[in-house]
Amino acid sequence: MTAPRPTPPSGGRVEMIHGAGGKAMAELIASIFAPALANPYLAQGNDQAALPIPAGGRLVFSTDGAVVSPLFFPGGDIGKLAVNGTVNDLAMAGATPLYLSTSFIIEEGFPLADLDRIARSIGAAARAAGVAVVTGDTKVVERGKADGLFIATAGIGVVPAGLELSGDRARPGDRVILSGSVGDHGVAILSQRENLSFATDLESDCAALVPLVAAMVAAAGPALRLMRDPTRGGLAATLNELARQSGVGMALEEAAIPVKPAVSAVCELLGLDPLTIANEGKLVAVVAPEAAETLLAAMRAHPLGAAAAIVGTVVEDPRRLVRMRTAFGGERIVDWLAGEQLPRIC
Amino acid sequence: MTAPRPTPPSGGRVEMIHGAGGKAMAELIASIFAPALANPYLAQGNDQAALPIPAGGRLVFSTDGAVVSPLFFPGGDIGKLAVNGTVNDLAMAGATPLYLSTSFIIEEGFPLADLDRIARSIGAAARAAGVAVVTGDTKVVERGKADGLFIATAGIGVVPAGLELSGDRARPGDRVILSGSVGDHGVAILSQRENLSFATDLESDCAALVPLVAAMVAAAGPALRLMRDPTRGGLAATLNELARQSGVGMALEEAAIPVKPAVSAVCELLGLDPLTIANEGKLVAVVAPEAAETLLAAMRAHPLGAAAAIVGTVVEDPRRLVRMRTAFGGERIVDWLAGEQLPRIC
C-alpha cells in the first residue's frame, strides 16, 4: 500500500460532514486512517473484515473505551492507549492478539493534524503489538457534545489449547507477582494536568505486554494461574477483584511493591495511594508456589518485567480481604477505592 | 443466572465513581449489565471472554459506534441500534453473527433508569439476532463532556467456506435488489426531533437482517455477489461506494424504489432526498441476472423483505456513475450527499 495520500491534513478541522457516510468520510478514511493503519484486511474496503480462522484452542475477545484527558501525555496518547488497553486484556488470557477494530467518536472542530498524529500512533502501537487494525467506524458529533476524541477498540486473539488463565484460579499458597513499579501512568497524566514540574521525567508505562506474557507462559506453563493488568483502580482494585473472583484473601508486603520516587513524591504531596493509581503497562500474575522463582526470573529477563517482584501470597480468607504488611511493620487492609480519584485516566 | 439484582436502579444517576474501576463500577455492572445481557461467556467475569473457535470458512469482524440523538425514538433506541448496526455489518458478508462486545461512554448524571432500559434493549436485540454480548467496558466522563450516552459495539461472525461476498464483485448485467422502503429510520428520527405530528406513525426500520440474509444465501447461492446495508448516506452513498469499489456504473429506476408515503411527505416538506436518508433494517443486494427473480421471490417470502424490489442494473461505466431514470421519464445522476443532512442519525 504505497498509494499517495489524497488530502494531507494541514490546518483543517473535522466537520460534521466527515461523519455523514458520504464522500467526505471516504476521503477522511483514505487520507488519514488507511495510510496509518494499512494492511490487506483493512484494504478489503467493506463494512467488515473477512479473516482466516486462527488455529488454536479458543478465541479471546475484548473491548476497551479510551476517554483519557489530555489526549497527548508523556509516554503516549489516546491512540496508543486504546490499542494497548485491548491488546493487554487479550494478553492477560494468555492469548496472542491478532486483530483490532477501532470506533472513533470525534467532536466537530477537532484538528485534522491531531487526528492524523493519533492515527499514526495507533498504527505504530498495533505494529509493535503484532496486531492489525482490520475494521473501523467513524462518527462525528456537534461541538460541545464530546471532548475532542473518544476511541473504542475491540480485539480478537487466540489462546493455545490447554492454557486456561482466569481470575477464579488463585489458590491459597500461590504467589502474587507484579511486573514492575505501580502508578506511573496515572501520576504521569496527573502531573501534566496539574503542572507538577518536579515530576516531568515521569512517563506513562503504556505498553503492549504481549512479549512479556509469551515469556511467562513459556517459563511457568500450567503453574501460571492467572494474569490481570491493574489499570483503573490500580493494584488495589485488581487484587480485590481477583480475591472476590477466586474466593481467597491476599497477604501483601508493602516493602516488596516497586514505586518510583517521583510517583511516591506526587502521591505524598496530593495524599494519593499509589496502589489505587492506574497502570497501563504492568501486570499481576498469580502462580503456584513451586514455579514462582522460575517465573520471576523469566520476567526479570524481559525489559517489560525488569523490576518484577513477588509482592505477596494468596491466603485462605472467607472475607476475601487484601491485607498488607506495611513498611513500618504494621498491617492494613487494602480496599477498593471508595471515591473517584483520577477521572479520565484511560 | 437468577442472582438477585444487587442495587435496582431507581431515581439514581451515573456518577464519576461508576467509571473508576472500583466497587461502584462492579456494582453497576452487576446490577444493570449482567442481568440484561446474561450468558455463560459474560459470566466468566474476566476482562476478556474466552470463546470456542467457530467451525467455518472465515471469521468476520466489524464495529459500529452509536451516537444517535435522541437516545429513544419510534421503533428503537441507541441500544437496539448499536446491536443491529454491528450485526448487520456482519450479516452483509453472509456471516452468522456470534459474539458482540459493548463499550459504553456515559456522561456523568445520566439516569440509571435510562441506562437500565437501554441495557435491556441491548439484551433483547442480541437475543433476537442470535448473538451473545460476551465482553464490555464502561467509562464515565464529566457532565458536559459527552451527550448522555455513546455505545460502540464490535462483533464476530463466521461465514461458511465458499461464500465470498464483497463490494468489489458487482459486474455489468447484475441486478440490484433493495429489500424494502428507504428512509424510514432517518425520517422517524427527524420527525421526532422536529415534532412533525403528521409523521407520528412512522417507525425506524431498525432490525437485524440475519434471517433474511440466511434465506437469500440459501436461495441464490454463488449467484449472490454482495450485500450492503444503506445506513448513513442512504441508498445513494451505498450505491456510489459499490460502483467505485467494483469499477462499474449503476442504472436505477426511480419508480421501482419503495418509499413510504409518510417518508415522501416529510422529504418534500423539508427538501430532502429519500435516497440519501439512513436506513437501519434494509439491504441492497447485487445478484447475477439469472438468479434475480429467484432471489427476489425468496426475499419477498420473508417479513424483512416483503417489499423487496429489483431497482436497477449494474452497467459498464468507467466514470462509475449511479444514474436513475426518474418517475417522469428523465434521467439524473444520484450522487453522494455533498453536505451534512441529518447529523447523529445513528
Image (cartoon, coloured by chain):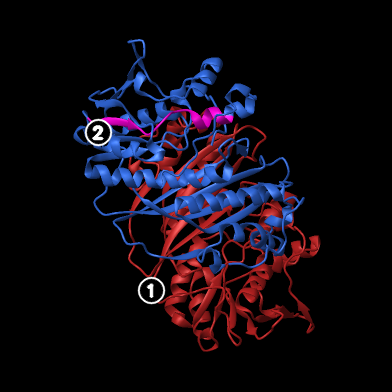
Chain colours: A red, B blue
Q: Which residues are magenta?
A: B174-189
Callouts 1 and 2 on one subunit: no
Query: Tag 2's secondary structure?
Result: helix
Mark 1–mark 2 distance (CA, rounded to whole Å): 47 Å
In the depicted view, which residue is nearer to us: B181 or A189?
Answer: B181
Residue B177 forms part of the magenta stretch: yes
**Amino acid type for the residue under numbered disc 1:** Ala
Image vertical order of residue A215 relative to residue B104, above or below: below
In the depicted view, which residue is nearer to us: A15 or B5?
Answer: B5
A35 with respect to B29 (left or right): left
Give percent across and percent down for residue B138. 62, 54
Indicate the chain on which mark 2 is placed. Answer: B
Give percent across and percent down for residue A201. 65, 58
- Disc marking residue A161: 1
**Amino acid type for the residue under numbered disc 2:** Glu
Residue B37 forms part of the magenta stretch: no
Direction left: furthest residue: B290
Within the image, what quadrant is residue A318 found in?
bottom right
Direction front: furthest residue: B301
A103 with respect to A276 (left or right): left
Q: Residue at x 48, y 83 (%)?
A: A223
Residue B93 seen in the current view? no
Q: Which residue is mark 2?
A: B293
- Count of residue discs: 2
Give percent across and percent down for residue B129. 45, 50
Indicate the chain on which mark 1 is placed. Answer: A
Few, some or many C-alpha atoms within 10 Å of disc 1 (few <14, some 14-19, many ≥20)? few
Within the image, what quadrant is residue B295 found in?
top left
User: Contact, CB < 8 Å: mark 1 with mark 2?
Assistant: no
Q: Residue at x 60, y 27 (%)?
A: B200
Q: Nearer the viewer, mark 1 or mark 2?
A: 2
Image vertical order of residue A296 relative to residue A35, above or below: below
